[in-house]
Image (tube, rainbow, N blue to C red):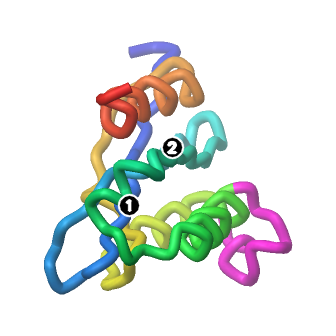
Amino acid sequence: MQGYHLFEYATIRLIPRVERGEFVNIGSILYCSGERFLECIFHWDDQRILTLFPDVDLVLVKGYARSFELICEGSKSGGGIAGLTIAERFRWLTATRSTIIQGSPVHTGYTRDARTTLQKLHADLVKTNQ
């Protein structure tokens, strides 16, 4: 498949009460080694989130999400993790953890354009009700 690159992606989930396992998809992250690409995008449906989880602190959660973006960008503001290689940053961001922002299992595919693929996946998996 000449011209195609292997990519990995995950959906980013908001899980305000980890012990309950209930979540809302709030973002997408995609890593493509062949394009040296790592990016995440978020969609905030505040009304939906607060309807399902009225006690969630959206300002705090959005701050955590901003940390994901800084790490993807490799920004010094993203702390030590942002200084790792692109692959290491993706693995760290999608590692299984017990926090209110978690990644889904990682999936793979092939793409000619990582950014376009990320936007399509995000529209399909996060913004499905828009």
Residue at 59% across / 29% down in the picture?
A: 115
State the quadrant of the C terminus.
top left
Which residue is disc 2 drawn over?
Answer: 43
Q: Residues within 10 Å of mark 2 (few under 14, many from 20)?
A: few
> Which element carries disc 2, helix, strand or loop?
loop
Percent of width and height locating residue 93: 49, 68
In this rendering, the label closer to the viewer, 2 or 1: 1
In the depicted view, which residue is nearer to us: 1 or 20? 20
Q: Is residue 57 above or below residue 111?
A: below
Say the numbered circle drawn on residue 50: 1
Residue at 42% across / 74% down in the picture?
A: 56
> Which element carries disc 1, helix, strand or loop?
helix
Q: Amino acid at mark 1?
A: Leu
Percent of width and height locating residue 69: 66, 58
In the depicted view, which residue is nearer to us: 21 or 56? 56
Percent of width and height locating residue 67: 65, 69
Q: Quadrant of residue 109?
A: top left
Q: Amino acid at mark 2?
A: His
In the depicted view, which residue is nearer to us: 100 or 115? 100
Q: Is residue 35 visible?
A: yes
Circle count: 2
Q: Is residue 128 above or below residue 55?
A: above
State the quadrant of the N terminus.
top left
Find the distance from the CA under tag 2 to the CA under tag 1. Answer: 14 Å
In the depicted view, which residue is nearer to us: 38 or 13? 13
What residue span does the magenta drawing correspond to? 73-85
**From this viewpoint, which residue is outermost toward the right?**
76
Residue at 85% across / 72% down in the picture?
A: 76
Looking at the image, is mark 2 or mark 1 earlier in the sequence?
2
